């Protein structure tokens, strides 16, 4: 087969025979280059002759990302593309979609040219083989490369790419790293030109630069410690309400020996925050953590909080809520169970963590919250079917943040804030454990609304 014969108007397919690498019958007699042809990878109703080739020894999350290509082709076209691990470099096929395989020379050559956070998608056609190559360096680049291929080349009736395709892109990392060396459960407040980051330990960092990756100064201790605190000074959230600043937070009571949620108040974001509840506002015989604030459609204040797995009858965590009085000092209703940690299909643990409420432009009530998926600590999305705080609540299939999305760190305990430029961000600590190679750092993920839910803003 002449290489020039592939550069024809019309579609080029590929068969298992290396000697018949894909000239269509209509084009067999044409020998001059007319225009760049398309290589057909898969077509609805026809058997796919391409093999999806990748390193057999990649870690699980990278393999799952790569296999998204296979799932997309199957979902859109009803066609199976066979996976081919390349542990044996001699095990090659005449038509391969090669994803970052160091055992395929044509792919390795491209991989060696890439810098961090860069990817390329390229076709290489020879007399012996047709290769469509996706090569990348870094988790962000992998995510973008695979999404690029699926979105631009996997159609509703066929998968095809130009035979002269050669795209290289440098990807700007989506996450903004705060640079705060260690802070768990970060909650961001913007007030009078200053960003404040509150976190576990009842500490506060502040940033006057106007940029989220600017200098954060601290830590400052901003809480007047209640007398019965026995430890676990966790997850402080600060909300401005009726002209004052209220901190929803958790501590271990030396009186009840249970963790519980409390509310403190200050006239300033820098404190001192002083407890206004009579100890824990949550049930004294529960372990309750991670309280957050919500004001319903009628203007009534609520606390949403975690009924921790350590004090449930089956060791499965719950989310709960209760209405508060006007001055936020006590519950005026009994807690209502909202959902369980094992409700989502993606959850692998019995933990409910880090709740935060969000109302979409269309009026839908969402909650972001954390548990584990198979990659680690993550952030999921729950939706109130009624639009009311008491639900019923259902879990969305796709999580908002997972290690699978970056290939680097897991992370969670999220909250949502809007930057001064109008960009909305998800704030999390990432990774969830310092043993992952970096201490728990506040990072900010750009997000937006799409189809009445929350997605990354890429």
Image (cartoon, rainbow, N blue to C red):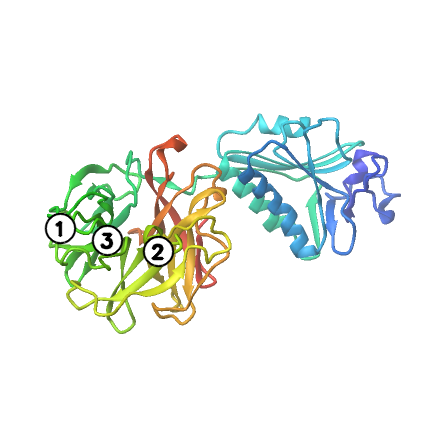
Q: On the image, which quarter does residue 361 sit in?
A: bottom left
- Residue farthest front in this picture: 313
User: Which residue corresponds to the image point at 55% horizontal and 35% vertical from the top-left?
Assistant: 59
Coordinates of residue 41 in the picture (x, y in percent): 72, 46
Q: How far apart in space, not on screen, are marks 2 and 3 (Cα)?
A: 14 Å
Q: How far apart in space, not on screen, are marks 1 and 2 (Cα)?
A: 31 Å
Horizontal placement of 35 versus 201: left or right? Answer: right
The kind of secondary structure element at disc 3 is strand
Q: On the image, which quarter does residue 64 sit in?
A: top right
Q: How far apart in space, not on screen, are marks 3 and 1 (Cα)?
A: 17 Å
Residue for badge 1: 273
Structural crowding at the residue carrying mark 2, measured as other residues with C-alpha within 10 Å and reported as few (<14), some (14–19) or many (≥20): few
Q: Nearer the viewer, residue 305 or 383?
A: 305
Q: Nearer the viewer, mark 3 or mark 1?
A: 3
Horizontal placement of 366 versus 40: left or right? Answer: left
Residue for badge 3: 260
- Residue farthest right in this picture: 29
Establish if 188 lies above or below 128: below
The kind of secondary structure element at disc 1 is loop
Structural crowding at the residue carrying mark 1, measured as other residues with C-alpha within 10 Å and reported as few (<14), some (14–19) or many (≥20): many
Give the mark nearer the N terminus: 1 vs 2. 1
Q: Nearer the viewer, mark 2 or mark 3?
A: 2
Q: Nearer the viewer, residue 349 or 392?
A: 349
Establish if 364 lies above or below 114: below
Give the mark nearer the N terminus: 3 vs 1. 3
Residue for badge 2: 312
Coordinates of residue 165 in the picture (x, y in percent): 66, 40
Look at the numbered discs 3 and 1 and tell me whether their residues touch, using CB distance below 8 Å: no
User: Which residue corresponds to the image point at 23% horizontal and 54% vertical from the top-left?
Assistant: 261
Coordinates of residue 417 in the picture (x, y in percent): 31, 53
Which part of the image, by quadrant, shows the N terminus? Answer: top right
């Amino acid at each position: 087969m002449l290489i020039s014969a592939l550069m024809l108007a019309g579609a080029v397919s590929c068969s298992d025979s290396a000697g018949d690498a894909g000239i269509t019958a209509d084009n067999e007699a044409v020998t001059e280059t007319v225009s760049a042809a398309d290589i057909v990878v898969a077509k609805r109703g026809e058997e796919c002759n391409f093999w999806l080739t990748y390193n057999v020894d990649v870690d699980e999350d990278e393999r799952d990302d790569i296999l998204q290509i296979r799932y997309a082709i199957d979902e859109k076209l009803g066609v199976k593309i066979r996976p081919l691990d390349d542990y044996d470099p001699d095990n090659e096929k005449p038509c391969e979609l090669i994803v970052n395989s160091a055992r395929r020379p044509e792919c390795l050559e491209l991989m060696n040219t890439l810098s961090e956070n860069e990817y390329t998608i390229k076709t290489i056609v020879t007399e012996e083989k047709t290769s469509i190559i996706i090569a990348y360096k870094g988790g962000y680049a992998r995510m973008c490369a695979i999404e690029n291929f699926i979105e631009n080349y996997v159609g509703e009736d066929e998968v095809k790419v130009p035979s002269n395709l050669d795209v290289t892109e440098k990807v700007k990392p989506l996450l903004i790293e705060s640079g705060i060396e260690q802070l768990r459960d970060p909650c961001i407040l913007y007030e009078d030109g200053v960003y404040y980051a509150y976190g576990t330990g009842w500490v506060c960092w502040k940033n006057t630069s106007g940029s989220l990756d600017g200098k954060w100064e601290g830590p400052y201790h901003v809480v007047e410690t209640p007398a019965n605190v026995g430890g676990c000074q966790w997850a402080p959230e600060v909300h401005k309400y009726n002209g004052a600043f209220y901190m929803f937070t958790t501590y271990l009571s030396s009186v009840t020996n249970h963790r519980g949620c409390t509310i403190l108040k200050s006239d300033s974001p820098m404190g001192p925050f002083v407890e206004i509840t009579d100890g824990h506002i949550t049930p004294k015989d529960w372990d309750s953590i991670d309280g957050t604030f919500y004001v319903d459609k009628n203007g009534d204040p609520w606390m949403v909080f975690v009924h921790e797995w350590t004090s449930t009858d089956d060791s499965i965590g719950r989310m709960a809520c209760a209405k508060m009085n006007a001055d936020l000092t006590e519950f005026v209703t009994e807690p209502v169970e909202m959902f369980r940690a094992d409700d989502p299909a993606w959850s692998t643990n019995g933990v409910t963590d880090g709740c935060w409420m969000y109302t979409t432009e269309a009026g839908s009530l969402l909650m972001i919250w954390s548990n584990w998926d198979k990659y680690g600590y993550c952030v999921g999305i729950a939706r109130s079917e009624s639009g009311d705080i008491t639900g019923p609540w259902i879990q969305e299939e796709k999580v908002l943040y997972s290690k699978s999305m970056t290939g680097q760190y897991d992370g969670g305990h999220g909250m949502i804030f809007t930057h001064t430029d109008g960009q909305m961000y998800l704030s999390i600590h990432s990774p969830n454990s310092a043993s992952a190679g970096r201490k728990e750092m506040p990072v900010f993920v750009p997000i937006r609304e799409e189809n009445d839910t929350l997605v990354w803003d890429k």
